[in-house]
Amino acid sequence: MLVGSIEAGGTKFVCAVGDEDYRIKDSIHFPTTTPEETLQQAIDYFKKFDIEALGIASFGPIELRKNSPKYGYITSTPKPGWKDTDFIGKMKENFDIPMFWTTDVNGSAYGEYVMSTLSNEKIDSLVYYTIGTGVGAGAIADGKFVGNIGHPEMGHTFLKRHPDDLDFKGICPFHGDCLEGLVAGPTFDARLGKSGKDVPLTDHVWDIMAYYVAQAAIQATLILRPDKIVFGGGVVSEAFLDKVRTQFKELLNDYVEVPDLDKYITMPVIKNNGSATLGDFALAIRELQD
């Protein structure tokens, strides 16, 4: 059996074909340009394979409610040209197969959840944050995604400002200094005039960002009480997470019990940003079986 995966990012698409054991058989990636050009590239790719189901994890916001006339759409995205794109409709025009439609971070969360269960880690709930060009998060409780009338937008929660960062207004076009506006990759340029990869971890800006990311982890902890919180994306490294764990411990102040922080606040189990692809395979298989 072959199933397909589309990880639809605002910068690039990653398309892959895998089997029932979640092993990648073939993959391709290409830049996200216009909806017409990009979706056609995905269609042309999958026409080379006899896939039985397709999992799609897309940047958003997207419409997840199947009773909505805009189910399967990318909706109010700031990505130029992509607002109100009928993603699922275009794929259904070309493939008469089951499709699972969710957010990019939900796909990654599900991939991490599946891999954790396959490795006999006792995980019933999990939150996955990605911190890169933007910030988003997906949450799973008892094997199901959290969110009914829409998907969570945990990258746009509000935070207590760091006393050394009060003059920075944030970069989110909607909220200014929400989580995304304070810790996404482009904030390095906005604060310092250079890319994050050129900023050493000894720079105080990393402590400021760890303060904000730790607050996000505390929000997830106190609201959802997950078994673990996973952080992925280009901004995140193990050294940065050490700073986050330190801030988390100080801010939480032992208010509730959490697992050992090295196991509770972690990098992805699946390497090379492959969480969404594995998650898509698993969701495609689930859709096929339902």
Image: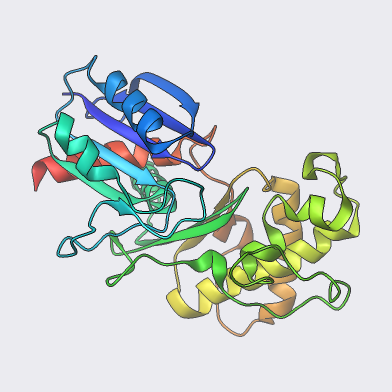
For residue 176, above or below residue 198: below
For residue 224, above or below residue 266: below
Q: Residue furthest bottom?
A: 255
Q: Position of residue 161 (x, y in %)?
A: 76, 78
Q: In the figure, is residue 21 to the left or right of 181?
A: left
- Residue at the image position 15 percent from the left and 30 percent from the top: 95
- Residue at the image position 41 percent from the left and 53 percent from the top: 83
Q: Position of residue 222 (x, y in %)?
A: 51, 80
For residue 111, above or below residue 45: below
- Residue at the image position 25 percent from the left and 51 percent from the top: 72
Q: Residue furthest top?
A: 48
Where residue 23 sits, quadrant-wise, is top left
Q: In the figure, is residue 275 to the left or right of 21?
A: right
Where residue 152 sits, quadrant-wise, is bottom left
Colour scheme:
rainbow
Viewer can see residue 120: no
Q: Position of residue 220 (x, y in %)?
A: 51, 72
For residue 42, above or below residue 92: above
Q: In what quadrant of the picture does the N terminus appear?
A: top left
In this orientation, which residue lies closer to the viewer: 279 or 199? 199
Q: In the figure, is residue 57 to the left or right of 249?
A: left
- Residue at the image position 36 percent from the left and 65 percent from the top: 151
Viewer can see residue 135: yes
In this orientation, which residue lies closer to the viewer: 69 or 45? 69
